Image: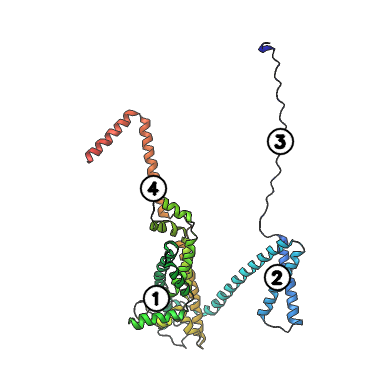
């Protein structure tokens, strides 16, 4: 049988068309549904009506705080019962915890808004006048009008004292945190114990310590510098404890990779650990500043009180905003009380500005480059691109041009030598 006698191969049957895949349905994880909103509204309305009946008609109770507390407890019970009618037990517990978390957050925001609103209303009478931010109380008496006197000396004193305390406390606190978390050894435990004990130290004890050691023993006078030392004693353990926790959260693989590349422990801490923990370290600094900015008793013992403007923290007495508020809010004169509340409003604004500045300066994510670093990398990339373009041009021109280019380069180098 020859090749021509072979039977012809039959063509394969066409494959049946594939069925279209079913349309994908997006599954929504979390979020708030209509049933959630209606359940919350129903539980809140029903618990409010029941609370009003119990407080006004049945129980001999009174008071706004008790009314709100009972309303919240009845709301949680009502929400659980309504949830059992439409969800399973596990889902009811999950959503009940979510409602408690949301309500706690809203309560905190409401308290903060209430404090800011109350201080703003009480202090607006004095803060609306420009003299409050440009004048001191040197020539102002208790019966002077609200258009006389201000708190510029207290604002300047608070800024200088807090700035010096931050300058002292932050390097010491972060260094102690690095020692406890990176170096260790026998002294790590005593240092940690001492830092934890100082965290709960009363502020009056810190003021008495600086008063006895710096002012009485060493002979320094009461000044803003002495007050900043007292604030440093209060701020340093806060910064140390928060910084240690943040540094311990840095993955150990980053340290191992740095050691594998030949870096020393110091270079690893400085170039790997601290930049990675930068956002957390900024939070530690903010917590320390929040502890020191509102202290009154250490400043009173170490800096004294004055109505004059003193811009030199190393000489003579100096007042701060918390001490200014404490001194004037207890007086029986409405204008003095208004000045105290205006100073409290200025203190809140100053703290807000300081915190935002700290976040902007140190809040970059790990590995995020600065503008200068990005420009340096771009210049290096452009230089490398020009060099590669020149090499491609020389290679495309042929061996003669390449040889001439090498000869010219060698002559130039020889002439320079």
Element at badge 3? Answer: loop
Quote the CA–CA distance across marks 3 and 4.
54 Å
Mark earlier in primary sequence (4, 2): 2
Q: Is residue 62 above or below residue 13?
A: below
Residue 178's quadrant in the figure? Answer: bottom left
Residue 372's quadrant in the figure? Answer: bottom left
Answer yes or no: do the residues labelled 1 and 3 have beta carbons within 8 Å? no
Viewer-side label of 1, 4: 1
Quote the CA–CA distance across marks 2 and 3.
54 Å
Q: Is residue 218 above or below residue 187?
A: below
Query: Which residue is label 4 attached to?
Result: 379
The 10 Å Cα crowd at callout 2, few under 14, some 14 to 19, many 20 or more, is many
Mark earlier in primary sequence (1, 4): 1
- Which of 77 and 114 lies nearest the eye of the viewer? 77
Query: Which residue is label 3 attached to?
Result: 18
Quote the CA–CA distance across marks 4 and 2.
62 Å
Query: Which residue is label 2 attached to?
Result: 76
Quote the CA–CA distance across marks 1 and 4.
46 Å
Q: Position of residue 371 (x, y in %)?
A: 42, 54
Mark earlier in primary sequence (3, 4): 3
Q: Which mark is residue 363?
A: none
Element at badge 4? Answer: helix
Q: Residue at x 65, y 79 (%)?
A: 65
Element at badge 2? Answer: helix
Q: Position of residue 18 (x, y in %)?
A: 71, 35
Quote the CA–CA distance across marks 2 and 1.
49 Å
Structure colour scheme: rainbow
Query: Which residue is label 1 attached to?
Result: 229
Residue 318 appears in the rendering: no
């Amino acid at each position: 049988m020859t090749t021509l006698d072979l039977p012809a191969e039959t063509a394969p049957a066409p494959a049946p068309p594939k069925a279209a895949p079913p349309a994908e349905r997006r599954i929504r994880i979390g979020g708030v549904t209509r049933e959630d909103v209606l359940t919350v509204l129903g539980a809140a309305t029903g618990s409010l009506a029941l609370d009003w009946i119990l407080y006004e008609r049945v129980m001999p109770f009174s008071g706004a705080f008790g009314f709100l507390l009972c309303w919240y407890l009845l709301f949680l019970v009502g929400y659980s019962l309504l949830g059992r009618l439409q969800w399973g037990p596990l889902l009811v517990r999950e959503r009940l915890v979510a409602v408690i978390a949301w309500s706690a957050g809203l309560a905190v925001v409401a308290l903060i808004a209430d404090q800011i609103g109350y201080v703003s209303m009480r202090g607006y009478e004095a803060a609306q006048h420009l003299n409050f931010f440009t004048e001191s109380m040197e020539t102002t008496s208790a019966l002077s009008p609200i258009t006389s006197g201000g708190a510029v000396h207290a604002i300047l004193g608070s800024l200088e004292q807090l700035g010096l305390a931050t300058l002292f406390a932050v390097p010491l606190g972060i260094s102690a945190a690095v020692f406890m978390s990176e170096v260790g050894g026998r002294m790590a435990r005593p240092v940690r114990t001492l830092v934890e004990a100082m965290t709960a130290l009363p502020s009056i004890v810190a003021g008495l310590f600086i008063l006895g050691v710096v002012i009485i023993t060493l002979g320094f006078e009461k000044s803003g510098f002495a007050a900043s030392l007292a604030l440093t004693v209060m701020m340093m353990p806060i910064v140390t404890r928060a910084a240690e926790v943040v540094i311990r959260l840095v993955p150990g693989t980053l340290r191992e990779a740095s050691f594998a590349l030949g870096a020393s422990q110091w270079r690893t801490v400085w170039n790997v650990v601290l930049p990675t923990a930068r956002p957390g370290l900024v939070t530690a600094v903010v917590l320390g500043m929040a502890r020191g900015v509102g202290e009154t008793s250490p400043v009173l013992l170490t800096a004294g009180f004055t109505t004059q403007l003193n811009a030199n923290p190393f000489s003579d007495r100096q007042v701060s905003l918390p001490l200014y508020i404490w001194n004037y809010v207890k007086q029986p004169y409405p204008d003095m009380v208004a000045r105290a509340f205006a100073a409290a409003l200025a203190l809140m604004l100053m703290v807000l500005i300081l915190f935002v500045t700290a976040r902007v300066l140190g809040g970059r994510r790990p590995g995020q480059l600065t503008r200068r670093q990005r420009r340096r990398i771009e210049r290096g990339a452009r230089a490398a691109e020009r060099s590669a373009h020149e090499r491609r041009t020389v290679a495309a021109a042929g061996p003669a041009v390449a040889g001439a280019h090498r000869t010219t380069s060698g002559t130039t180098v020889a002439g320079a030598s």
